[in-house]
Image: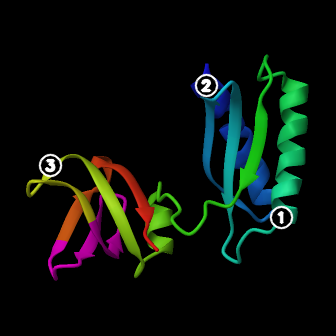
Amino acid sequence: MSDHVADKVRAFAEVLLPTMGLELVDVQFRREGHGWVLRLFIDREEGVTVDHCADVSREVGQFLDVEDVIDHPYHLEVSSPGLERPLKSVRDFNRFLGKKAKVRVHENVDGQKVFVGIISEASEEAIQLDLEDGGKIRVAFDQISRARLVF
């Protein structure tokens, strides 16, 4: 059920946010404590303000009410992804070329699953990190399980 909700909200937000000058970073819908939380992470080049979050919250809230997507109580949260934002697309990696990232892969590469380095290249096929020890690692994009900026 949580994937169904996240997918519907993602589809709506991917149409809505560009009209507001924003981009969708991630959608999460999960049980926390005694309730459910729907989180949207939004961003834009110049940064996100509280007003942006409030506007998106209002629009998404109206969508959820009209479409009746969630049939039980939940909390809606809209925020920026923060300094250590996730990197989910080739566009994200290209946007943050020259920045430090932590990348986790599905299968060991050179005996490791986690790499930290500067993003030096990004394409549809792979990314390249300049590692802290002076080496370089090229990781196929489909082998990345998680990645985020490191502050």
Sequence-earlier tag: 3 or 2: 2
Residue 103 figure quarter:
bottom left
Q: Position of residue 83 (x, y in %)?
A: 56, 69
Q: Residues within 10 Å of mark 3 (few under 14, many from 20)?
A: few
User: Residue at label 2?
Assistant: 2
User: What residue do we see at 75% from left, 51% from top?
Assistant: 78
The numbered disc on residue 108 is: 3
Looking at the rendered structure, the secondary structure element under dot 1 is: helix
- Residue at mark 3 to residue at mark 1: CA–CA distance: 41 Å
Q: As shown in the figure, which amino acid type bears the numbered disc 2?
A: Ser
Which one is nearer the viewer's eye here, 91 or 50? 50
**Is 141 in the magenta?**
no
Q: As shown in the figure, which amino acid type bears the numbered disc 3?
A: Asn
- Residue at mark 3 to residue at mark 2: CA–CA distance: 30 Å
User: Residue at label 1?
Assistant: 50
Bounds of the magenta span?
Answer: 116-136
Q: As shown in the figure, which amino acid type bears the numbered disc 1?
A: Val
User: What residue do we see at 88% from left, 64% from top?
Assistant: 51
Labels 3 and 2 touching (C-beta < 8 A)? no
The N terminus - image quarter: top right
Does residue 15 appear to the left or right of 99 in the view shown?
right
Residue 140 figure quarter:
bottom left
Q: Position of residue 15 (x, y in %)?
A: 74, 47
Q: Is residue 61 above or below residue 18?
A: above
Q: Position of residue 145 (x, y in %)?
A: 34, 46
- Residue at mark 2 to residue at mark 1: CA–CA distance: 26 Å
Labels 2 and 1 touching (C-beta < 8 A)? no
Which one is nearer the viewer's eye here, 142 or 116? 116
The outermost residue toward the front is: 33
